[in-house]
Amino acid sequence: MTSQNPTAERRIRIPRPVYGLAAILAIVAVAGFTTPSFATLDNLFVVIRAASLTGIVAIGMSYITISGNLFALSASSLGALLAVLFALITAQFGFAAGVVLTLLLAGVSGVAQGVAISLIGNPIITTLAFGTVFRGLAALLSGNSILRIESDLALWIGTARPLGIPTQSWAFVVAALLSWFVIRHLKLGREIVLCGANPQAAIASGLRVGMVTSVACIALSTGVAIMAMLTVSQFSQAKADLFMGYDFDYIAAVLVGGIALRGGRGSPLQAALGAILIALLQNFMLLNGFSAGLRMTIVGFLVVVSISLFHVLQGKSR
Amino acid sequence: MLVMTDIVKRYGPTLVLDGVGLAVKAGEVMALMGENGAGKSTLVKILAGIEPSDQGRIEIDGKPVAIRSPGQARAAGVGYVAQELSIIDSLSVAENVFLGDSSIGIMRSAAKLAEMARPYLDRVGLDYVDPLALAENYSVAERQLIEIARLLSRKARIAILDEPTAALSESEIIRVKAAVRAIAADGCAVIYVTHRMPEVFELTNRVTVLRNGKSFAPMETATLSIDTLIEAMLGRQLGKMFPPRAARLGAEAVRLESCMTPGLKAPVSLSVRSGEILALAGQVGSGASTILRLLAGVTPLGSGAIFLEGNAYAPKSVADGIASKVVYCSDDRKRDGIFAVRSVPENLSAPALSAISRFQLLSGSLEKGHIRSIAAKFGLDERYFSRLAGNLSGGNQQKVALGKWIGLNPKLLLVEEPTRGVDVGARAEIYKHLRELADGGLSIIFASSDTQEVLGLADRIATFFHGQLVQVVAADTATAESLTRDVTRAEQAA
Amino acid sequence: MTLKMTLAIAASLVAGLAASAAYAESKGSVVVFVPSSTNPYIGQFQLGAKDKAKELGYDVKVIENNFNQAEQDSQVQQQLASGEQVAGYVWWPFENAAGVASLRALSQSGAPVIVSNQYPIKGTEAFWTAYAGANDFLSGKTAAEILLEACAKAEIKCDKGAIIRFPAGVSAGDDRATGFQDAVKGKLTVLDVVPTAGFLEDEGYKVAAQIIPAHKGELTWLYTENDSLAGAAAQAAKENGLTPGKDIFIVGGTCHGDSKHVKSGEIAGTAIQSGYWEGWMAVQALGKYVAQGKVVDGEKYLEGTPDAAPSDADPLYKYNFLPNPAVGNTQAAYDAAKLWGKTADQLCNF
């Protein structure tokens, strides 16, 4: 018999992304006063561009978290592998084949990881192992050399600015909206949320928990594939050590966005906002010449603060 | 011995306790009763120092005491056994007995600690327990008793037990009751929070009822009847707790023929008709809940056959069962009955996602219609639609856990402990709605350790003991005594 | 017939035994500690080390760590615990300062230790036989010279600029930045020194795309410590309406990865820093020590001759530096550039 807190009923419900937006505005305000070059429209576009690739993966990562599987630690390594594969395929068969096959292979890797997580039961350990395999394969396939592609189409995709906005930023915005739509309005999205909220209850309700885990892994793999292809296209080359050490960035975006670790709550939009928030902070620190170590410390600190903050807010609304 | 007067507690603008008083004498067991949300837990938490009161006095032995923290409560001689047990599985029994006792140095040897724990364990009927064994080896009931032993080790003079038997079966409850009697006989003042009527009448000397944050003068238990007590808690005439039984039954809905499955020791044959409510009565491990899990598709059929409306039925998974319109509510609502962090509508539509979607796209209007019809059938107030399921009271959570299945128009509803952790008012409502559904043609099989519920709700009762079906009787011919005898028969034979 | 066959088998057996005997009589093995070859430069380093060892008659055992000093330390412990007799060690620590204890442990085994790539820390001289590898001060200086030359020919005013450097803690990044800043002192103004979080294009782009608009109208040059970062910076400059080589001069100073930006003139020029030759000269240094048995005090910049590789008979100095010959930013200059018999294409495009 838990006596309820009747105030919960009267509380005005604030959608969680609003907290993220408020934090973004706060940073913009503070930074704008102290750093003149910060609060310009140009710089805003620069920041969104800087957040794009991390953001696309973080959006995919949010599916893993929302589906109740914490995090995947294989995203950066998968990115390197898919970048290498994309470069190899594009060099051999052209850009279109590269895109199609890379997405297909990303899907395969998603299913493989999803099935393995369902069998092993621990997403962290499973994806850690997969990550090692992916990085190793990337090194083997690339022969530890730089793979070049000669594709004008790829270069255009990687460097074009339709309506003055880089393709990466477009991809980011589209991915965020699409992911939000899937979670919010598709039957599949609801299933992902419910499985994350309580996998036992989901099984008892006849929902397909194993399938949902695989779908979440595919969502992440797709985000990773898009990041990998955009990066390779932009620089016309791929290497096995691409994206090394980026996993924390993806996870940080999800956490700073306030997506609950225990799953079943939150929206991909929050991960997108989290990525922008971190990029804003990074940009501010970069313009002020903070050292990389200091930048890392501050971002880590932001993650700790935001997790604690959301934890407190969550406890209050219970 | 203990006198609490004029206790006031607010959560935000809401008054949870509005000048509540509670007085308990040494050697007495005082029942603290009331519906969910009446303030029982808040009151005992204030006494245990877990929550501060906004106002009010606490006197022990005529002297005012200040209790603002668990440490102060302990110093004042107050011991508290919470609903959620605080036994640590990975520690030994003896270490659990002395958990948090700062007077026990960390250097004390395990053997010495075990020797010190021995008398306390003996006193609560755990004389056979090895104090050096890990707590994880013992059942929920035994852990509950270890908690009570902990109170004794701390020389608590006022013992608070918050629903100590909520998760226990009848025979386990007997052991807890014995332990409670023992500590009361030693001069302890016991405050016993419970929903279970039989315990109140067997165990307690007096009853204090809380209602809407106010307390009423304690009543001598001996002067009360179940009905007067329920009415005191509800503040109105209850009428009857249980709805009338089925007037007429339909055709046979499900039949088990010599079914065997892990958990059963002899083949079971049973049948249930459309519109009928069958109770499975038995202690933990008796096989009663095994039958539910077998029918639900959780446990596979070993041998024998099941027929659902005349067709062979052998579910391999819960999803198979659902596809055949056989649905199942386990006894652990929090674990697999509700999605605590999601809203009530999302909970209600969870098993019926296909029904509320068009081309994989969720339809707001379909979903709204779906949950409205469930809410109407199950008496769930639409006010709750904006809330998370985890924030509802136990009774409303159970309505959600059961109600989500109603939207599928099931043929057979399987329920384990239909009203565990549900307060009296909501209980009566749930019984009413289950009977209405049965009258609409649904077959219901439920397993319960609550004798009142088994006798009151069911049309027929199947009793189980030790993995075997003992007998099936019409509910109106059974009594509490005959039922208790049936479910514990071998213990008496032995 | 049978006799013939038996003889043939016997002969081949003998030959096989002889061959394996010859193998066993190799001059011993060289153990090379390096970070992971998933980094292409390190892959080249290994290749060069293996080629030179084979030529000198050594076996090679390469022990890679995954960019982790703790892992490398434990590898050293395991190698030493194996009790294997080795001809010598090549030591490329992942974190120079943190790896000193392992370096000392290696030196105490009695085998010669050649340090490479990471310029040794002062005071550790007793722990290593010789340094043979890149000189990052020199790399920074060469980059500065390329930039100053481009500025001299430029039509625009060439004064203020920024340095995009390797992550903090990477000593090569410190050394290159110092070498560069020393060389441009009094000639150019450094507005900003911004560290990246990595060594590749994506990181370079991320930083440059934020730095360039922030200093709009001020930046006339960028030094990026390698060509991967430089290429990405060139791309960011173009996206901000600046034409590299005309409105802004960008120099990386070490050919690393894509040569496209050098050949097109977008980067002001580059210098060959060859991983292959660095690995090669580290093993050569070991060979020299084994053959000559002595180390000459002082520094030696090996000559950057286009065709002939330096002779094994040259003396071994305490510090032996890899030359960084500059390469002009045209297709023709790039095609003509050579170091020790290998073309820039072979040495840079790995």
Image (spheres, grey):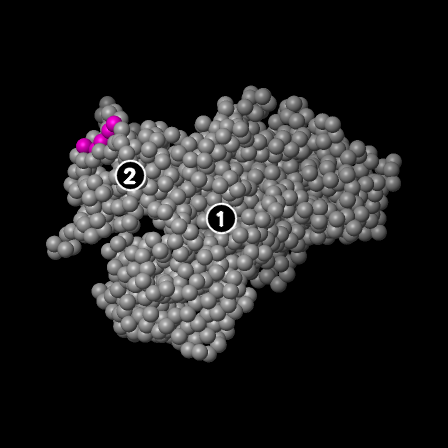
Q: Amino acid at mark 1?
A: Asn
Look at the image and tell me whether residue C11 can be seen: no
To which chain does the residue with label 2 belong?
B
Q: How far is mark 2 from mark 1, CA to CA? A: 33 Å
Location of mark 2 (residue): B245
Task: Say left or right for A294 vs A74.
Answer: right
Q: Residue at point 67% right, 48% down? A: A23
Indicate the position of residue C285 as horizontal and vertical percent values.
57, 49
Indicate the position of residue C290 as horizontal and vertical percent values.
52, 52
Q: Residue at point 68% right, 25% down? A: A156
Location of mark 1 (residue): B391
Q: Amino acid at mark 2?
A: Arg
Q: Residue at point 77% right, 48% down? A: A32
Indicate the position of residue C341 as horizontal and vertical percent values.
63, 35
**Dominant SS type (magenta):** strand
Of residues C97 and A72, which is closer to you in this image? A72
- For mark 1, give the secondary structure: helix
Q: Are marks 2 and 1 on the same chain?
A: yes
**Residue extending furthest toward the left:** B493
Q: Residues within 10 Å of mark 1 (few under 14, many from 20)?
A: many
Report which quarter residue C199 is drawn in: top right
Task: Say left or right for B328 vs A191.
Answer: left
Q: Which callout, 2 or 1, points to the residue nearer the camera?
A: 2
To which chain does the residue with label 1 belong?
B
Query: Magenta residues, as a range?
Result: B251-257
